[in-house]
Image (cartoon, rainbow, N blue to C red):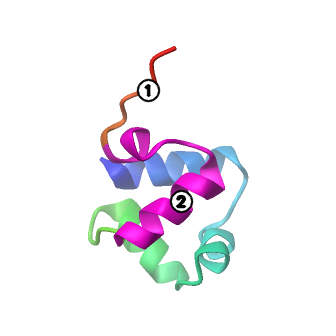
Amino acid sequence: MIGIRIAQLRQDRGFKQADLADLLHISASAVGMYEQGRRLPSLNTVISLCQIFDVTADYLLTGKEPQK
């Protein structure tokens, strides 16, 4: 699920939910809802997450690693 990947990427970088929320210009509770699977991020938020974490949208949405 996208929420699990968001949480893992956030934790891997040492961000708190509030840190990520600040970068995305959203509330920390929205980040928490994404991570819990209670809400899906908008397309613009997905794009921002990909840029922040330097991952592809394919990875973020499906967990599929880019082929080398």
User: Which residue is depicted at the point 47% across and 72% down?
Assistant: 31
User: Which residue is depicted at the point 66% across and 73% down?
Assistant: 23
Category of crowding for the residue at label 1, using alpha-carbon neighbours closer than 10 angstroms: few (below 14), some (14–19), many (at least 20): few
State the image coordinates of residue 57 (x, y, percent, origin top left): 42, 47
User: Which residue is depicted at the point 62% across and 50% down?
Assistant: 53
Q: Does the magenta run of residues contain 49?
A: yes
Position of 3 relative to 27 (above/below)? above
* Residue range (magenta): 42-61
Position of 62 relative to 13 (above/below)? above
Residue 55, located in which quarter of the rendered image? top right
Q: Amino acid at mark 2?
A: Leu
**Element marked by disc 2:** helix
State the image coordinates of residue 11 (x, y, percent, origin top left): 62, 50
Q: Which residue is mark 1?
A: 65
Residue 32, located in which quarter of the rendered image? bottom left
Q: Which residue is mark 2?
A: 49
Position of 4 relative to 58 (above/below)? below
- Between 24 and 12, the residue placed more toward the observer is 24
Q: Amino acid at mark 1?
A: Glu
- Between 36 and 13, the residue placed more toward the observer is 13
